[in-house]
Image (cartoon, rainbow, N blue to C red):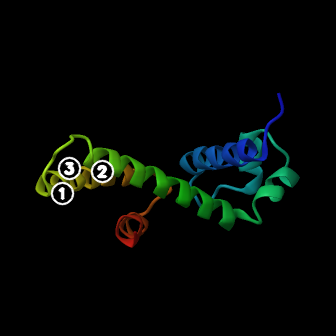
Amino acid sequence: MYATAVDTRETLITAAFACFRRHGLRRTTIVDIARAADVSRSTFYEYFRDKGTIVEACAEVASQRFYRKLAQAIEREAGSTLEDKLVRAGVFVSQARRVMEPEAYFDQEMVDLILAKN
């Protein structure tokens, strides 16, 4: 079975997340990401122009996951009041913040930006 372009892109993003956790955002190189994804550097460049573009793609993926999980948390119980939903949203964001803060590739300013920007 052959990998599709979407599969390869997702593999690169997954590998980038793993490398960022292992080496930190600044110390991770394109070579690190390509090796972790088991692709060549030229394949990396077919999907991403540079390290900045894969960082942006990772941020987008993380943001989509966050909002998908937030929506699930808010809508967990049918027939909830607005107050119930707001409480669940607040709890979810607080828990997410505790999970994100210790991540080695995020600094406090980045955590604040991610949580406040959107």
Residue for badge 1: 86
Residue 98, disc: 2
Quadrant of the image occupied by residue 89: bottom left
Residue for badge 3: 88
Q: Is residue 46 left or right of residue 19?
A: right
Query: Disc 1 marks which amino acid?
Result: Leu
Residue at disc 1, secondary structure: helix
| Real-space Cα separation, disc 2 to disc 3, in angstroms | 16 Å
Observer-nearest of 86 and 115: 86
Q: Position of residue 18 (x, y in %)?
A: 59, 44
Residue displayed at 50% across by 56% down: 105
Q: Which mark is first along the chain, 1 or 2?
A: 1
Residue displayed at 36% across by 64% down: 115
Foreground disc of the pair 2, 1:
1
Cβ atoms under marks 3 and 1 closer than 8 Å: yes
Residue displayed at 74% across by 65% down: 50
Residue displayed at 58% across by 48% down: 17
| Real-space Cα separation, disc 2 to disc 1, in angstroms | 19 Å
